[in-house]
Amino acid sequence: MGEHDGLAELFETHRPHLRAVAHRMLGTGGEADDAVQETWLRLSRSDVGGVANLGGWLTTVVSRVSLDMLRARAARREEATPRPYDQARDDQAVDGTVWNGAGDPEQEAVLADSVGRALLVVLDTLTPAERVAFVLHDVFAVPFDQIGPIVGRSPATAKKLASRARHRLRGRPETAGAEAMRHRRVVDAFLTASREGDMDRLMAVLAPGVVRRADPAALPPGVPVVVRGAGAVARETVVLGRRARFAEPALVNGAVGVVVAPRGRLLLALALAVEGERIAEIDVVADPARLRALDLALLDLALVGQAV
């Protein structure tokens, strides 16, 4: 076995860890694979004979590659304009029947499930440096004296970046304690009934006079922007319920709501008003400008923060 073959074999033992790091930083399996491949190319061109901790070296490289990709993504991100509902596009995004990006759509969905769709959505709201610092420290326990050089900051500044990210992920919940937990139970019941297409359970969790408002970009042609009444909203929810498979509770503008992220990228958000044990209002946000303006946070992390 040649030296290059031995290095490749050694690299393969680190590949699962490197892909896990890159996926949490970048959000998609395809981009994570690109980052890991670039890491291999850099390894194959480097003299690592004197490297005592190859795993640490590789983690540093894949982190720097991911950071560069995040910065490039932020630099080319343009102001998106609202698009009318496109059934084919929606099916591609939700069902993965057509996938024009890198990677397999089913695998992307599995990866998003394994990490948590809400986490990937909220991570995408962080700056590149915040995301890298948080993922490395809070997820993979990398010390800040190693994170600092990766993000081009001092260890103390890297610690502040991770702290800001943690605060951002926790958000600012409007409700606390028992009320927040009650809202969470209502939203969980709504999502379960939506996934199962259970009209009776939907009717039980929707207020009789519930109002559903939606951006036109979220709706098929002919569906009204405003729908009133539990029966009408429940029927529509059943028809469009395939999205619920890719939905998770999250904190939306400080209240318990829902994010829909088929492959870890935000497609829709539901801002909900809960009154008593039922949902009284649903605002379906699909307009890119409105989505960017939402204050999104991790619901479970917010609830844990209230308890400590």
Image: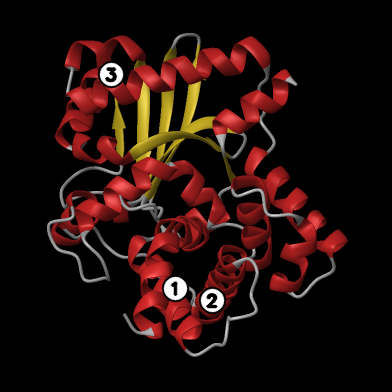
- Tell me the number on the disc at residue 35: 1
Q: For the residues labelled 2 and 3, say whether their Cβ atoms are less than 8 Å apart.
A: no
- Tell me the number on the disc at residue 236: none
Q: Position of residue 92 (x, y in %)?
A: 18, 58
User: Mark 2 or 3, which is nearer the eye?
Assistant: 2
The answer to whether residue 29 of the structure is visible from this angle is yes
In space, the residues marked 1 and 3 are separated at their CA atoms by 47 Å
**Considering depth in this image, is 36 or 227 the residue closer to the camera?**
36
- Position of the C terminus by quadrant: top right
> Taking 135 as reference, is 269 left or right?
left
Q: For the residues labelled 1 and 2, say whether their Cβ atoms are less than 8 Å apart.
A: yes
* 66 lies above or below 84: below
**Residue occupying the point 53% across, 58% down:** 124
Say which amino acid is labelled 3: Ala
In the picture of the structure, the residue carrying the numbered disc 3 is 230
**Residue occupying the point 64% across, 30% down:** 302
Circle nearer the N terminus (2, 3): 2
Q: For the residues labelled 1 and 3, say whether their Cβ atoms are less than 8 Å apart.
A: no
- Tell me the number on the disc at residue 65: 2
The answer to whether residue 261 of the structure is visible from this angle is no
Say which amino acid is labelled 2: Val
